[in-house]
Amino acid sequence: ANTDVDRAPLRAAHREYMAELVAREVVFASGPVAESADGESHGGATVLHAADANEARRIMDDEPFVRGGARTYELMAWNVRHGNYATC
């Protein structure tokens, strides 16, 4: 979720960090969620390849927007059942 902290000064570091994670194949997908009917942005979503919740938490805690107080996150496990990345 977004906070009241200005993200503009953190944006370049955020983009660099995310690009590095993509290059290392740690990020499967990431980006803002679509605006709601009221026109407000409600944050984004990032899907990580992580060994466990502790690794995912370390990755997200180092993300510049999070580290700078401009965003918070909620960590959730995703058990993929269908699609090219299904594990069952």
Image (cartoon, rainbow, N blue to C red):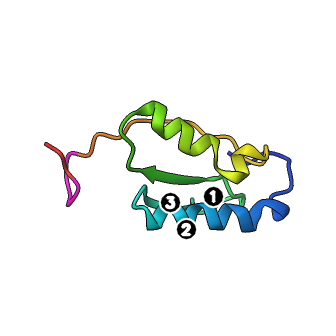
Chief secondary structure of the magenta portion? loop
What residue is drawn where x is 72% and y is 63%? 13
Q: Residue at x 53, y 53 (%)?
A: 45
Residue at the spot of label 3: 21
- Residue 85 located left or right of residue 77: left
Residue at image coords 54%, 64%: 20
Q: Which residues are magenta?
A: 81-85
Q: Amino acid at mark 3?
A: Leu
Q: Position of residue 30 (x, y in %)?
A: 51, 60
Per the rendering, the mark at residue 84 is none
Q: Residue at x 75, y 65 (%)?
A: 11
Q: Which residue is mark 1?
A: 36
Q: Is residue 3 above or below residue 26?
A: above
The local secondary structure at tag 2 comes to helix
Q: Dot 2 corresponds to which residue? A: 19
Secondary element at image label 3: helix
Label 1, secondary structure: give it: loop
Mark 2: amino acid: Ala
Q: Is residue 65 left or right of residue 18?
A: right
Label 1 neighbour load within 10 Å: few <14, some 14-19, many 20+: few
Kind of residue at badge 1: Ser
Within 10 Å of disc 2 (Cα), the crowding (few <14, some 14-19, many 20+) is some
